[in-house]
Image: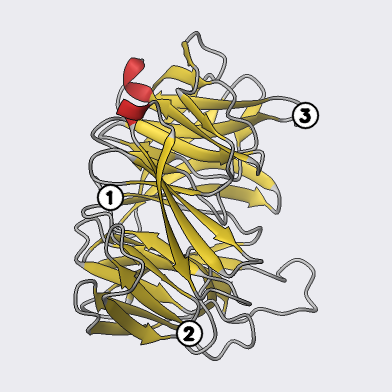
């Protein structure tokens, strides 16, 4: 394990966002680094896909409207290799880039899909599907399908349920966040306990599982097959940002000096060594969003205007080749930074 302490106040370049889009929509990037924003219009039962290009000054150029998404949560994922979109309420369907009708249907879950309970593999060959049903701890399956044909590759019986976030490290490893199987309404400390776990598609067994009593999020670093999250010493007492490898070993542990501690949100990997992460002063009066070179163990930049970034329903997006980072901020707009300018 590589463990080190970072000073969040060390001198660093300040990076302003290169674009602000007055729309709080789930961000993603296509393979060329163009921005894709997926807006859920509840009252109309629509998903609207907005696209913006760097060469056009990041103005929204095209919109694709997908109909038939009324009265229930919707699961959405963007294929990082081809720009395809998987979306659905109980049955995920595959939409080719720019298409308004689906080309492939995937298996149906028992209850419902949540916004982040679909996840493509980095190659775009597989799609992981978790049931977001918040009814009873009976449906504990995560499914993995062929992303082009819809054919089921595996059904993994888990110890979690109500999957609010599913992602893939590669075509054979699934990371999910769900409620603990022994969840109890009446236990004030354990009520709503979350578990983050990594499952092997071939063996259908857990590589590792970690309880997160206060519902932290996670992010995946596909390049190095790491899962980033925040550890805790007690409920609502954050200790460190850590990266867990596919076998459950902690590969990195990052702590902070100067009266700062990690935020509940996980670091997000951008490229081979950069991380975007948030830290908060222990008096909760100051928050900083840092760009950290994890190999050099130093802060290389801070992100300006990165306040109250959303990680749960609409997590940030990265495009490694261009070092672009996009996030919904303050729940009412989306900001885009280009970290290559560092």
Query: How crowded is the residue under tag 1: few (<14 C-alpha within 10 Å), some, or many (20+)?
Result: some
Q: Secondary structure at mark 3?
A: loop
Residue 73, located in which quarter of the rendered image?
bottom right
- What residue appears at the point 63 percent right and 77 percent down from the top-left corner? 71
**Residue at the (36%, 67%) spot, across then down:** 100
In the picture, residue 253 is in which quadrant? top left
Q: Is residue 169 left or right of residue 329?
A: left
The disc placed on residue 283 is: 3
Mark 1, mark 3: which one is toward the viewer? 1
Where is the N terminus found, in terms of image quarters? top left
**Mark 3 or mark 2: which is in front?**
2
Residue at 29 percent across and 46 percent down: it is 30
Res. 269 image quadrant: top left
Mark 2, secondary structure of its residue? loop
User: Callout 3: few (<14), some (14-19), or many (20+) C-alpha neighbours within 10 Å?
Assistant: few
Residue 321 image position (x, y, % from top left): 23, 34
Q: Nearer the viewer, residue 51 or 224?
A: 51
Residue 29 in the image: x percent, y percent?
34, 44
Provide the residue designation for mark 1. Answer: 222
**Residue on which disc 2 sits:** 140
Q: Secondary structure at mark 1?
A: loop
> Which dot marks residue 39?
none
Q: Residue at x 31, y 81 (%)?
A: 105
User: Mark 2 packing: few (<14 Cα in 10 Å), some, or many (20+)?
Assistant: many
Judge from the rendering whether residue 208 lies leftward or rightward of residue 322; answer left or right.
right
């Amino acid at each position: 394990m590589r463990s080190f302490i970072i000073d969040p106040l060390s001198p660093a370049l300040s990076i302003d966002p290169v674009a602000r889009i007055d729309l709080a929509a789930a961000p993603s990037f296509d393979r060329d680094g163009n921005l894709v924003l997926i807006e859920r219009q509840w009252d109309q039962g629509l998903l609207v896909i907005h696209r913006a290009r760097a060469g056009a000054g990041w103005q929204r150029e095209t919109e694709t409207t997908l109909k038939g998404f009324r009265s229930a949560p919707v699961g959405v994922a963007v294929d990082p290799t081809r720009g395809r979109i998987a979306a659905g309420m109980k049955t995920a369907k595959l939409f080719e880039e720019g298409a308004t009708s689906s080309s492939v249907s995937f298996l149906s879950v028992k209850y419902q899909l949540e916004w982040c309970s679909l996840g493509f593999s980095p190659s775009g060959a597989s799609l992981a599907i978790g049931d977001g049903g918040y009814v009873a701890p009976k449906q504990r399956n995560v499914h993995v399908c062929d992303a082009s044909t819809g054919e089921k590759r595996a059904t993994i019986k888990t110890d979690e349920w109500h999957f609010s976030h599913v992602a893939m490290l590669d075509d054979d490893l699934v990371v999910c966040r769900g409620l603990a199987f022994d969840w109890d309404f009446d236990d004030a400390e354990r009520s709503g306990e979350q578990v983050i776990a990594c499952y092997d598609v071939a063996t259908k067994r857990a590589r590792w599982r970690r309880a997160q009593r206060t519902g932290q999020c996670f992010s995946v670093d596909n390049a190095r097959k790491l899962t980033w999250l925040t550890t805790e010493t007690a409920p609502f007492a954050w200790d460190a940002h850590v990266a867990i490898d596919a076998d459950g070993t902690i590969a990195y542990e990052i702590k902070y000096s100067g009266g700062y501690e990690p935020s509940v949100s996980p670091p997000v990997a951008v490229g081979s060594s950069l991380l975007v992460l948030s830290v908060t002063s222990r008096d909760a009066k100051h928050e900083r969003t840092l760009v950290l070179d994890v190999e050099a163990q130093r802060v290389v930049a801070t992100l300006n205007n990165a306040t109250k970034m959303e990680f749960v329903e609409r997590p940030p997006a990265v495009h490694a080749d261009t070092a672009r980072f996009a996030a919904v901020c303050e729940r009412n707009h989306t900001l885009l930074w280009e970290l290559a300018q560092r």
